[in-house]
Amino acid sequence: MKFKPKYNYMKYWRLIRYYVKAKHGLGLADLELLMFLHDEEYFTQDMFNKFNEVLSWDRLRFIRLKKDGWIQMYQNKIKNRKALYGISYKTETLMNYIYKALAGNPLPEDPDNNPLYKKNVSYTDKVYRNLISEMNETIKQSQRQTLE
């Protein structure tokens, strides 16, 4: 007998991840690191680097994520105490959006909110756009069945 989980959160992970990459310019390694840090209230640069070691190598990732507003400093370095960082409101908002999408909220299908729906996109973007539309339709149908 095949095991069927009660919830299938990861079914559309690839589509959601591609949308986030297109909208926010975050690669998979950046996104995985932000998801890890999302659960940490505060962290040092050493903690960041420790998890960063298992990701694709990018020695400027910390600087770039800080410059782009994904992480922010909460406490400056004081004598023997290291500087403390945390995720920004921007990251918190994105993580909440991703979790809602994984739980079954549809992705936007308009060009103002989803760059994959703009006119001049690549073939790959069009393929993902079509799959996002199908995903959204499946989600709407399952929500209708739940209400009945």
Image (spheres, helix red, strand yellow):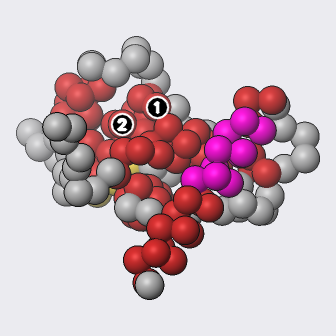
Query: Measured from the top left, where is residue 73 in percent x and y?
Result: 33, 52
Query: Measured from the top left, where is residue 70 in percent x and y?
Result: 45, 49
Identity of the residue furthest to the front in this view: 1
Span colored in magenta: 126-135
Query: Measured from the top left, where is residue 98 in percent x and y?
Result: 44, 56
* Front position in the image: 96 or 125: 125
Tag 2: residue type? Glu
Task: Check contact, mark 1 vs mark 2: CB within 8 A.
Answer: yes
Tag 1: residue type? Leu
Residue at image point 52% right, 63% down: 139
- Secondary structure mostly seen in magenta is helix
* Front position in the image: 25 or 22: 22
Identity of the residue furthest to the bottom in this view: 148
Residue at image point 81% right, 29% down: 123
Which quarter of the picture shows residue 83?
A: top left
Which quarter of the picture shows residue 21?
A: top right
* Front position in the image: 84 or 86: 86
For disc 2, the neighbor class at 10 Å (few under 14, some 14 to 19, many from 20) is some
Magenta-colored stretch includes residue 121: no
Which quarter of the picture shows residue 34?
A: top left
Residue annotated with mark 1: 28
Query: Measured from the top left, where is residue 58 in percent x and y?
Result: 44, 19
**Quadrant housing the N terminus:** top left
Residue annotated with mark 2: 32
The image shows residue 121, relative to residue 19, as above or below, that is above
Report helix, strand or loop for mark 2.
helix
For disc 1, the neighbor class at 10 Å (few under 14, some 14 to 19, many from 20) is some
Residue at image point 79% right, 51% down: 117
Per the model, the C-alpha gap separating discs 1 and 2 is 6 Å
Question: Is residue 29 visible in the rendered structure shown here?
Answer: yes
